[in-house]
Amino acid sequence: MTAPTRPELVADAAVTVLARDGLRGLTHRAVDAEAGLPAGSTSNCFRSRTALLEAVVVRLEELDRAAITAGPPPDLTSAPALAAYLTGNVRLMTSRRHVRTTRARLVLLLDETAGPAMEAGHHRFLAMLEAMLAEGGHPAPGPAARAVSDLLDGALMHAASVRSRTIDVEELAGAVERLLA
């Protein structure tokens, strides 16, 4: 595995700062300290707060994509297989291993300045999901992708924000299958 690039190192540190300290704590200086870099390093990579927030969103997507694609791809022609794949990824994203990225994502949802970056990330996820559904032969991949995304986002948000809530993968997979039908 190759060492992270400077922008990746800074973005990873920004995710940690955001998850730990919230939006007010996310400063270039705090990210420099978290990354163990000289003062001004974060600013050299991402000049503005908006650029830093966009980098966090992109880095979260990269980390999610790496986690999601670590296993074998699903059979896109099988609604149960696709549903199990997607809901398994929601369970993974809400696991203890991914608590930092999930907290950072929730904090970003509350920040109006992160809105455009979050919206762009959402559209990229929708496009990926729609392409999967189209490849699997779904008759209406666009509307189905939006419905499934809304369901999964809601499950992810509830599992991350309500301590007593856990992901029941079978129940969620059944709901995804019904949406795909």
Image: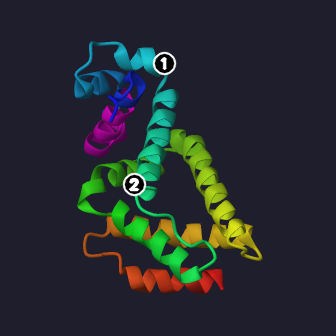
Residue 176 in the image, given as x and y percentages of width and height? 54, 80
Q: Main secondary structure of the magenta part?
A: helix
- Above or below: residue 155 compared with residue 32: below
Q: Nearer the viewer, mark 2 or mark 1?
A: 2
Instruction: Place residue 7 in its image quadrant.
Output: top left
Q: Amino acid at mark 2?
A: Ala
Is residue 157 among what the camera can see? Answer: yes
| Lateral position of residue 160 relative to residue 57, left or right | left
Range of magenta residues: 10-24
Residue 82 in the image, given as x and y percentages of width and height? 54, 74
Q: Amino acid at mark 1?
A: Arg
Q: Secondary structure at mark 1?
A: loop
- Above or below: residue 29 compared with residue 78: above
Query: Furthest-right residue in view?
Result: 139
Which residue is at a point 51% across and 30% down the rendered structure image?
Answer: 50
12 in the magenta segment: yes
Question: Would you name the residue on which mark 2 appears?
Answer: 67
Classed neighbour count for the residue bearing mark 2: other residues with Cα under 10 Å, few (<14), some (14–19), many (≥20): some
- Label 2, label 1: how many angstroms apart (C-alpha)? 29 Å
17 in the magenta segment: yes
Question: Would you name the residue on which mark 1 appears?
Answer: 47
Q: Quadrant of the N terminus?
A: top left
Which residue is at a point 29% across and 37% down the rendered structure image?
Answer: 17
Which residue is at a point 53% across and 83% down the rendered structure image?
Answer: 80
